[in-house]
Amino acid sequence: MQITIAHLKRGERGIITDVSSIHIPLKLLEMGCLPGNYVELVQLAPFKDPMYLNINGTHLAIRKETASHILIDKIEL
Amino acid sequence: MSKQINVALIGNPNTGKTSVFNSLTGLNQKVGNYPGITVEKKQGVCKLPRGVKAHIIDLPGTYSLNASSLDESVVIELLLNKNDKDFPDVAVVVSDVENLKRNLLLFTQIKDLEIPTILVINMADRMRYKGISLDIDHLEERLNTRVALISTRKNEGIDHLKNLITNYKDISVTPCLDTSEIDKEYFDNLRKAFPNQLVYKLWLVITQDVNFGKIDRNEIDAIANFKTKSKADLKRLQQKETIKRYQFINSVLKNGQTIDASQAKDLRTKLDRVLTHKVWGYFIFFIILLTIFQAIYDWSSVPMDFIDSIFASLSEWVKDTLPSGVFTNLLAEGIIPGLGGIVIFIPQIAFLFLFISVLEESGYMSRVVFLMDRIMRRFGLSGKSVVPLISGTACAIPAIMATRNIESWKERLITILVTPFTTCSARLPVYLIIISLVIPEGRFFGLGYQALTLMLLYLIGFGAAIISAYILNKILKIKSKTFFVIEMPNYKLPLFKNVVLTVVEKTKSFVFGAGKIILAISILLWVLASYGPGPEFNDAEAIVKKEYASQNLSEDELQRKISSQKLEYSFIGITGRAIEPAIRPLGYDWKIGIAIVSSFAAREVFVGTLATIYSVGSDEEETIKNRMAGEVNPILGGPLFTFASGVSLLLFYAFAMQCMSTLAIVKRETNSWKWPTLQLIIMSSFAYVVALLAFQLLK
């Protein structure tokens, strides 16, 4: 199974590997959600949705559904 | 040099662009709308060295030139249209030192349009806390432009920026990105097809869905023929473009910026741990709301009583001083009480806008969006609907415009439809005056009953919005992709100057906007109340004297009987009594009926209307509240404003759709009359039924 941002737990990090899915709005890419950039899960709202992320220094929140389309390699701490 | 320089301020949201604008222009600014659309247009004038003047336009915040909303398309429309009178001689891109990488994306796009582009790096005062150091010379060299490192908070670097703007002609316009890196073949073809055009500009025209009304017609036709790529292919190229741009930016920052993370003192992490916490986050949000309402109620009561008494004595003074006649009566009984009915609410409205602007400026509002998204989604709304629903407590009109950043059309439409249920500041006057009449004073755990009632009314409005959203979500069959991206900006202490400017600006437009309507309506009402058609009006004195001839009435009482006879048979009395059967079951008399009808122009007219109607024919110096308290129920006797009729009236105003301007905005934002018409009918009939039930159960 491929790991996506939706699988991250609080405080965990990963490197984005693929965002080519049509489910990802261009706006998200422009905010730095691109392959090669790091992502950290900062905080979860109740029911783990939406997810508060730090992507490449930009702090933003997206819904779990969108997060499940962004593939990552997890960085083990 | 006599020509003034056109400057466009551009930047991502949350970069302090407005602070830069305020620093450059001071109070020399005006806010209007772009023609035909409701996007706010802020312009100002700035004095530069050597007597040069700059005309500065503050464009809406945007993350890139790929527009996804009406606000953002304003930016690109202006930048692509050389013939626009506001077309910038120089663009100033405002960035935030902590998010330089992301901010530079927009910078490279604008520079590629071959417009001289100055980079402003704002919030320099935060560099030390974040362990950031910048090599400005290196950045200037690699980006091929001039850079101004400034701090609006400390007021540093503004003069340097002014110098750079003055000398904009020295700035290179070489693009940052070579378009052939994206897709050589495609862009080479494009270049061949339009040798006289800038390729990047064509590319923007092709990829944007915005309407470029002013671009040469032939050009667009030709482009339509050339469009050989499918939508999916174009999106892939846009992705590639974004990646290429970030590669360039990364290479620039590699030597231009160093961040020592160990130096960073992270306020964000500490605050977010509490403010976005599963339990504490919601608790704190609730406490903040509670504080706001208590404050609005308690803090503003003193200035309000003061204003009320000033207007009462002004009316009296006019009557005593000016020669008696029609004009004096119009002034003392029509215009002054009518205006008093609006001026009195300035303190509350200013407080409300103060709180809202502090919540937004501090970055807290985004946390609320984050906390509420999941809950709101259950009702067919988005977390971003919270912003319209909260700012709807000021006014539904900007609130409905604030729905534009909601990505899903269905979520956006539902938000637009339910936002008018939230308690806007125009309802506040009505609530306050009725609460003070029918709700007893006294305290419950330190909170006044009256303040609690006000809080309850806000909750009712919010509840009505949520429940109707839930129903609409089930009924509306609209398929639209839902996605949701929101930036979580850094926490900032709101800048005093920004907050004050917002409060002054918004209060002014509230008072003058409503003031015009109220002035017109109070003149109209006064005329209608002071004249009548039949003998019952014109011979009122004779009739009353005859009727009460047998009783020994004092002169005062007789005068009062004459006045009320006159009012009853005046034009307004006749109209009022015609509609009275419809509102009698709700516990209102015809005077309240007239006030309700006239408040369809704007809710706050209610108080002014009653003030005008009640003051016609009364001689004593009285405040609005006292006049209302003195009104007698014509059938039951006893005071007209009882607990039952008061509650009924409060509920009616809580639910009824009584604002023509809101309906007009809903029409514009949904592009159809269907939605505002439905809103008007459903909300108002619901209000009627609820008010009816309330009065019948409580009386």
Image (cartoon, coloured by chain):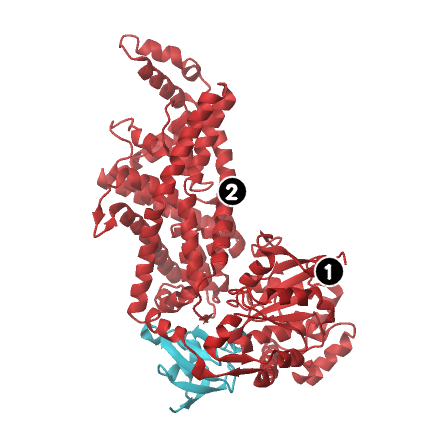
Chain colours: A cyan, B red
Q: Is residue B170 visible?
A: yes
Q: Position of residue B195 (x, y in %)?
A: 78, 75
Give the CA distance from mark 2 to mark 1: 34 Å
Residue at x 33% of width, y 13% of height: B555
Q: Quadrant of the C terminus of chain B?
A: top left
Q: Is residue B22 left or right of residue B459?
A: right
Give the mark, 2 or 1, whose residue is nearer the N terminus: 1
Q: Which mark is residue B677?
A: none
Q: Position of residue B223 (x, y in %)?
A: 71, 71
Q: Is residue B625 left or right of residue B88?
A: left
Which element type, helix, strand or loop, lies under badge 1?
loop
Q: Nearer the viewer, residue B497 or B556?
A: B497
Q: Position of residue B465 (x, y in %)?
A: 37, 55
| Residue that numbered label 2 is attached to | B512
Q: Is residue B100 above or below residue B423?
A: below
Q: The residue under label 1 is which amino acid type? A: Asn
Whether residues under marks 2 and 1 lie with C-beta atoms below 8 angstroms apart, the answer is: no
